Image: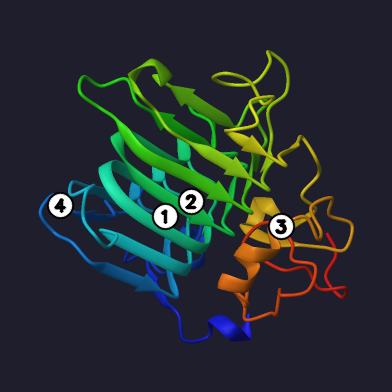
Amino acid sequence: PGALEREVVMEGDRLEAAYSDTPGQWDGLWLSSGSNGHAVEYLTIKNAIRGIFLEGNPGSGTPVLHMRNSRIYNSALVNLWTRNTYVLGENLVLGNAGVASLLCENGGRYSFRHCTLANYWSEGGRSGPTLLLDNTADGAGFQASDFTSCLITGNAAQELGILGEEGGLSYLFSHCLIRYEGGGGPGPGFTDGEKFIQVLLNAAPGFINPARQDFRIGPSSQVLGLANPDTALLLPLDLLGTDRTSEPDMGAYQHLASESP
């Protein structure tokens, strides 16, 4: 798309067409413990083993990683893998991956606004949900984890995993679509009004072409106009620069009438 003509693309060094969608060609980015204040915008990471792995400094006054208007997809394991750190994600697309699109483990602080987490992995079996919050390590504790106006979906029956609530895992999902069929809700259940606010279960996001990592939404989407209007004012433009201040849609993209699956 024209709005991303000047984006930075990080991928493997095999640029032949046959390798354009082959996962696991390079290791990915590692932001090690002790580093801080990383700002990333208009970046696409594709075909890695782990797109970005970062850890440490959860109590920093500013995010260890502030990532916006960016995409990570087709990782052999995890697109964004965090461990006891502080991340702010805005207008972020975390697409298909072999395990999870987003894995947050061993505590930390996380905030994701108008993000699309969608995993339609087709390169074999997938061992994890699209989003996994894992608080099972000794001494782990999530200071806060909130998802606002996000899409959390994919081609598995349950695309949200929450482990280790007894260890003090704090989280909030507000104005989000979550795919979770059968077995009741994770953790305390989706009826907990302090943790799940205006959550839409198992609706059709209406993606243009998820198999090709095209997670724009068309006019038939069931998430149109259901985002938090206050959050939309903080992020008035979507990933492609489309205004979303009027009847904002969930996820990283505001729909256009001319787009349809």
Q: CA distance from mark 3 to mark 4?
A: 34 Å
- The x and y percentages for residue 182 are 72, 17
Verify CB contact (< 8 Å) between mark 2 and mark 1.
yes
Q: Nearer the viewer, mark 4 or mark 2?
A: 4
Residue at which label 4 appears? 32
**Sequence-first tag of 1 and 3:** 1
The residues tagged by marks 3 and 2 sit, at their Cα atoms, a distance apart of 27 Å
Q: Is residue 34 above or below residue 154?
A: below
Mark 4: amino acid: Ser
Q: Measuring from the top left, give residue 241's x and y in whole percent.
A: 62, 81
Of the residues shown, which amino acid type is indicated by label 3?
Answer: Ala
Name the residue tied to disc 3: 227
Q: Residue furthest top?
A: 183
The quarter of the rendered structure image containing the C terminus is bottom right
Chain-order first, disc 2 or disc 1: 1
Q: Residue at x 81, y 73 (%)?
A: 256
- Tell me the amino acid under the disc marked 1: Asn
Residue 245 visible in the displayed image: yes
Q: Depth check: 113 or 32 in front?
A: 113
Q: Which mark is residue 91?
A: none
The tag on residue 74 is 2
Q: Residue at x 51, y 27 (%)?
A: 161
Q: Is residue 36 left or right of residue 120?
A: left
Mark 2 neighbour class, 10 Å CA radius: few under 14, some 14 to 19, many 20 or more: many
Q: Is residue 164 above or below residue 209?
A: above
User: Is residue 144 left or right of 57 when viewed as pictured?
Assistant: right
Q: Quadrant of residue 152?
A: top right
Residue on which the image places disc 1: 47
Which one is in front, 253 or 208?
253
Nearer the viewer's eye, disc 1 or disc 3?
Answer: 3
